Image (cartoon, rainbow, N blue to C red):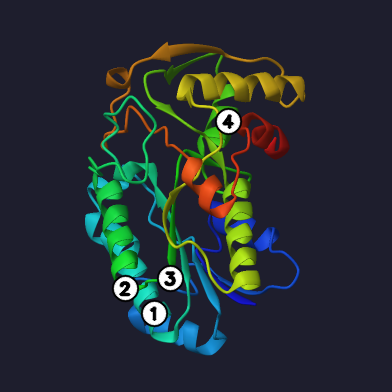
Amino acid sequence: MRVLITGAQGQVGQELIRLAPAGFTIAGFGSNELDISNPGQVVSRIGEFKPQLIINAAAYTAVDKAETDSERAYAVNAKGAENLAASAATHGIPLLHISTDYVFSGDASAPYKETDPTGPTGVYGASKLAGELAVAKQCAQHVIMRTSWVFGAHGNNFVKTMLRLAQSRDELGVVADQHGCPTSAASIAKALWSLASQYSNKGNLNWGIYHFSNMPATTWHGFAEEIFSQAVALKQLPRAPKVNPINTVDFPTPARRPAWSVMDCSLIEEKLTIEQSDWREELAEIL
């Protein structure tokens, strides 16, 4: 099966390339090779490669920058998703699309289900929600996979930031009142390849919106403490800095972060047999 992958230079994109199973012929394009906000480029790449499945891992993910760069955020996250979905539908190609917990307000106290009302509080989440709506409208054969707190071996992420700061600081303040589930880029890639394999074998999938993250839920403070504990055990750090819990109000950012990002992932296991893995084990592998 021929699979076209967008955003191939990103955190998830690089893992999709690395973990591609046997039996798939892939074409991975970074934004310098395929700008999904350009409909002409989308039509051209799909016409050249003639994929049987598209995985969209391209996104504008600079959450704070999006607040002042909304035009570009919407161009990639909304219009880009629409361009891919429209072209996919024209050729009868299914689309696997990555979305985010930021489509929710973060005001809940129980894990978000796929059917819960959305309510993004910033440009990034709003642009990603617009992308979801465009995909669902344009391409009937779609899986939208919402995920959260992505980390991995590639790109910029919380794990790399913590390890860098630990080199020069004995003490850190990390937000302890935001709750979510760290999710490794590799586990997202594996889940997407599982869906691709199911589609390749059956010629169909249970299309729709699904939640996928690693487990269990934690806070950024808890995540940081586990990063340092494992890094010290692996002798990647000589000692763990003291991690002081702080509140969101003590660390203001241009974009509001959801206080609650925990998602219920039971539907993807029930309908698509994708199981959650433990982010602590994923972290150990990455370190």
Which residue is denoted by mark 3 in the rendering?
A: 141
Q: Is residue 237 visible?
A: no
Dot 1 lies on which element? helix
Q: Badge 3, how many Cα within 10 Å: few under 14, some, many 20+? A: many
Relative to 264, is 225 above or below? above
Earlier in the chain: of badge 2 and badge 4, it is 2
The kind of residue tagged 2 is Gln
Relative to 185, is 143 above or below? below
Which residue is denoted by mark 1 in the rendering?
A: 89
Counting from the top left corner in percent of width and height, residue 218 is at: 49, 23
Q: Nearer the viewer, mark 3 or mark 1?
A: 3
Q: Are marks 2 and 1 in contact (CB under 8 Å)?
A: yes
Label 2, label 1: how many angstroms apart (C-alpha)? 7 Å
Counting from the top left corner in percent of width and height, residue 260 is at: 35, 29
Q: Badge 4, how many Cα within 10 Å: few under 14, some, many 20+? A: few
Q: Are marks 4 and 3 in contact (CB under 8 Å)?
A: no
